[in-house]
Image (tube, rainbow, N blue to C red):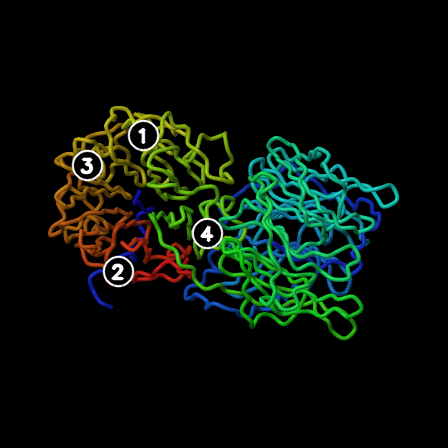
């Protein structure tokens, strides 16, 4: 679909027409000790962990997307110290990336007290803001998982170093804004450097650690907190011994536990386990790398289904390892492990502890840490290196980063990484730090096989088949934890295998990854626009398949509804139907796909705001839905609950639908439009509020091969590659300056994206959500290349 959004915010897309012009590296106690502990004080419980208010890709716009914000150059830049907001340096805090903001909770302060504060940092605005303190008792080293909408927190240690069984949930609503709720206390504490992951398939927080004591023995154990039923469940007994210092990550749809050491002797362990939350079963695995406190257990990018570990320490703690391995849960055990070599000259002093690490774009980044050699005082370091998972080689990370430190929090933020806090060596011992720096990667080079612009987001399938989007996060749970909406981020689980269809709508999107096949949709499901209500959560964690009776060849996502063209020539629609946009003769919402009666020979579909059209094999068109402006094309302004023929048009080759506006390209390269002319969308040289229910030819426009209709604007690509647009106050087709050789165009609420014949993608127009993909939120009147 080439589609748009609500009809009043469209004055920007033609401004240039016609005139020149992570993972977290945690600071651990120096003794690495684990004493016998009791349950901490239990927190008040709540039956309701909070009501979701929607997608938090951009609820608060005032900070982190300030007008005039520019793309930072590649390399290092300083960040404001957290003390600027009265937020002290700390160790053992929870740190997560809630797209656009880093959130820091709890931890142990330099004076030995424990914190219950939470603060957010915007790298775009370089600003720290404190949020309301939590109702939880102060703690450090808590388990935290980010669901894409909330932070669930569990356990940790209190000021007397006792483990806790209480927890809470923070509903993040923007920088400095959020709501706290408590959750039921767990049936018992979890110890041994407990860690957790989010299970999107079961909507659970999974926790792994141990129970018991040094006196009575430790036993590996885990818990699951069901965020839907709000109950705790014991995990089945793990198939391996208890361990501390293990690394726990989410890979291949499972919780993967790697390495660790004996809780008493610290002897490194070379095994691990996988827990499948759907079947609730464990599988024992062999890591081949006996070590504890390894630096990495993270997965992102195109290798997100793999887990990696690097570094770590032996039992005596005399030094540290400088190699690692990547584990693929989907491969047979004999081939599941791929080694990560020692960095060699790429990383001076490679034998490090307390290393900061993060992933981005299939690369593992290491920075800082502490050189530890037996008999010598530890030395903090300020260099780093990068391991390329695809090329399987190391390179040095550019110099100029923060002052040397160890145990700094490293947080992937899309093409940036935030390095904050940690400790250095000062007179009198270790000193906690409250400053840091941000590392900006150079732009990647990607070419696109397709592009689609929606209300406030854009997406493209790129050359290797991966799907990347930018702008308003259609679903934060369907992207990697480090996603940054100002730059393209990968959508999980979708990869094109050949010819495909891509359509971005209002707050959802859909794709068919082959020439024909199932329809995958993701994003908001508040109107049933992606799947039947009640079968999934409103924001599913991964794209879901629409239940259609046969494969589809096209899909078109509208404001709050979706239509698909099946291989049979039938059209099926679902979602919001208050104006008949599902074409089934009713005005009842249809969260399950239903056939549009009377259409059996369609060759193309196009859905707009509250209506849709189908192009038939005989070159005529049928439309239905809301018809205030005459967009149905039957010469009236009456809403049509079932398809009616667009009068006066034959020999149609392509049809496009926006908000109250529709256009068709005929086989002879001419274009006809009908519906709203509030913003000159008819291309007639006029602007009016009249009803235009009969198609009229756009004067002087010929040789058109591609057409895109937005909310108040239309763009057409000629055979020569020239792009012309009109609407949004431009009354006739005018050339778009700054781009040529266009092969595909997609218009939206108030921005346009076009793909050139060399597969480069350019966007322009409104950019408040980062929908132009240039790394900023600056509105652009001229086409700018998407910065991958």
Circle 3 Cα neighbour tier, 10 Å, few/some/many (<14 / 14–19 / ≥20): many
Q: Reading the chain from its start, which is encountered first: label 1 or label 4?
A: 4
Horizontal relation, residue 755 to residue 667: left or right: right
Residue shown at the point (54%, 59%) measured from the top left: 393
Residue that label 4 marks: 489
Q: Name the residue under label 2.
A: 739
Are the two marked residues, 1 and 4, in contact with CB atoms closer than 8 angstroms?
Answer: no
Q: Earlier in the sequence, mark 4 or mark 3?
A: 4
| Residue drawn at x 85%, y 46% as measured from the top left | 214
- Image coordinates of residue 706 in percent, x first then y, are 22, 47
Circles 4, 3 touching at the beta carbon (< 8 Å): no
- SS at mark 2? loop
Q: Mark 3 points at which residue?
A: 633
- Residue 566 bears which disc, if any? 1
Whole-number angstrom distance, CA of label 2 to CA of label 4: 24 Å
Name the residue rendered at 38%, 47% in the picture: 461
Res 28 quadrant in image: bottom right
Tell me the element at label 4.
Answer: strand
Earlier residue among tags 3 and 1: 1
Mark in front: 4 vs 3: 4
User: Mark 3 to mark 1: distance in Å?
Assistant: 24 Å
First-in-chain label (2 vs 4) = 4
Coordinates of residue 35 in the picture (x, y in percent): 83, 50
In the image, residue 768 lies at what x, y percent? 40, 57
């Amino acid at each position: 679909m080439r589609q748009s959004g609500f009809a009043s915010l469209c004055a920007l897309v033609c401004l240039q027409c016609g005139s020149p012009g992570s993972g977290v590296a945690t600071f651990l106690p120096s003794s690495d000790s684990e004493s016998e502990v009791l349950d901490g004080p239990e927190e008040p419980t709540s039956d309701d962990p909070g009501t979701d208010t929607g997608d938090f890709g951009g609820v608060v716009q005032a900070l982190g997307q300030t007008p005039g914000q520019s793309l930072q150059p590649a390399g290092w830049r300083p960040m404001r110290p957290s003390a600027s907001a009265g937020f002290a340096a700390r160790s053992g805090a929870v740190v997560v990336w809630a797209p656009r903001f880093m959130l820091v909770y709890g931890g142990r302060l330099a004076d030995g007290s424990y914190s219950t504060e939470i603060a957010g940092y915007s790298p775009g605005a370089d600003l720290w803001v404190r949020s309301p303190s939590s109702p939880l008792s102060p703690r450090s080293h808590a388990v935290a998982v980010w669901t894409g909408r909330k932070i669930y927190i569990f356990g940790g240690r209190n000021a007397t170093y006792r483990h806790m069984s209480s927890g809470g949930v923070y509903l993040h609503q923007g920088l400095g804004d959020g709501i706290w709720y408590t959750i039921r206390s767990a049936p018992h504490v979890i110890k041994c450097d407990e860690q957790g992951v989010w299970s999107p398939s079961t909507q659970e927080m999974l926790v792994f650690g141990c129970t018991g004591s040094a006196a009575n023995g430790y036993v590996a154990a885990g818990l699951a907190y069901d965020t839907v039923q709000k109950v705790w469940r014991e995990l089945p007994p793990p198939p391996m011994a208890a361990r501390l210092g293990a690394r726990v990550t989410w890979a291949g749809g499972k919780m993967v536990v790697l390495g660790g050491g004996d809780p008493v002797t610290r002897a490194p362990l070379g095994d691990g386990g996988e827990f499948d939350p759907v079947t609730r079963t464990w599988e024992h695995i062999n890591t081949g790398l006996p070590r504890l406190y390894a630096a990495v257990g993270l997965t992102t990018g195109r290798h997100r289904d793999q887990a990696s570990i690097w570094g770590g320490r032996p039992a005596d703690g005399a030094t540290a390892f400088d190699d690692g391995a990547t584990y693929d849960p989907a491969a047979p055990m004999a081939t599941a492990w791929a080694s990560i070599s020692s960095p060699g000259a790429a990383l001076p002093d490679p034998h490090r502890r307390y290393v900061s690490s993060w992933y981005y774009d299939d690369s593992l980044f290491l920075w800082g840490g502490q050189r530890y050699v037996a008999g010598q005082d530890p030395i903090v370091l300020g260099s780093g290196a990068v391991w390329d998972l695809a090329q399987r080689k190391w390179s040095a990370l550019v110099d100029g980063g923060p002052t040397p430190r160890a145990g700094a929090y490293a947080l992937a933020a899309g093409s940036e990484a935030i390095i904050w806090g940690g400790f250095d060596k000062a007179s009198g011992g270790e000193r906690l730090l409250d400053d840091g720096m941000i590392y900006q990667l150079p732009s990647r080079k990607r070419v696109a096989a397709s592009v689609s612009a929606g209300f406030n987001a854009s997406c493209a399938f790129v050359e290797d088949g991966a799907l990347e989007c930018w702008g308003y996060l259609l679903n934060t749970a369907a992207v990697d934890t480090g996603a940054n909406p100002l730059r393209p981020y990968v959508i999980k689980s979708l990869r094109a295998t050949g010819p495909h269809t891509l359509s971005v709508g209002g707050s959802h999107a859909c794709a068919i990854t082959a020439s024909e096949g199932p329809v995958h949709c993701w994003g908001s499901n508040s109107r049933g626009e992606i799947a039947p209500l009640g079968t999934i959560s409103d924001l599913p964690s991964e794209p879901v398949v629409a239940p259609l009776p046969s494969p589809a060849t096209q899909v078109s996502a509208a404001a709050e509804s979706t239509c698909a063209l099946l291989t049979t020539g039938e059209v099926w629609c679902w979602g919001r139907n208050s104006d008949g946009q599902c074409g089934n003769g009713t005005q009842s919402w249809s969260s399950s796909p239903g056939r549009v009666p009377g259409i059996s020979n369609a060759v193309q579909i196009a859905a707009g705001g509250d209506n849709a059209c189908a192009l038939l094999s005989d070159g005529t068109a049928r439309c239905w839905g809301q018809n205030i402006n005459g967009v149905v094309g039957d010469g009236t302004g009456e809403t049509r609950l079932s398809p009616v023929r667009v009068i006066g048009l034959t020999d149609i080759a392509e049809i496009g639908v926006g908000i109250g506006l529709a256009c068709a390209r005929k086989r002879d390269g001419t274009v006809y439009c009908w519906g709203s002319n509030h913003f000159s969308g008819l291309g007639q040289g006029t602007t009016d509020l009249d009803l235009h229910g009969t198609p009229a030819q756009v004067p002087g426009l010929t040789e058109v091969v591609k057409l895109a209709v937005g909310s108040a604007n239309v763009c057409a690509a000629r055979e020569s590659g020239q792009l012309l647009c009109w609407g949004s106050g431009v009354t006739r087709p005018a050339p778009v300056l700054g781009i040529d050789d266009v092969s595909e165009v997609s218009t939206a609420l108030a921005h346009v994206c076009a793909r050139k014949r060399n597969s480069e993608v350019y966007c322009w127009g409104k950019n408040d959500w980062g929908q132009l993909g240039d790394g900023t939120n600056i509105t652009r009147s001229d086409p700018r290349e998407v910065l991958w």
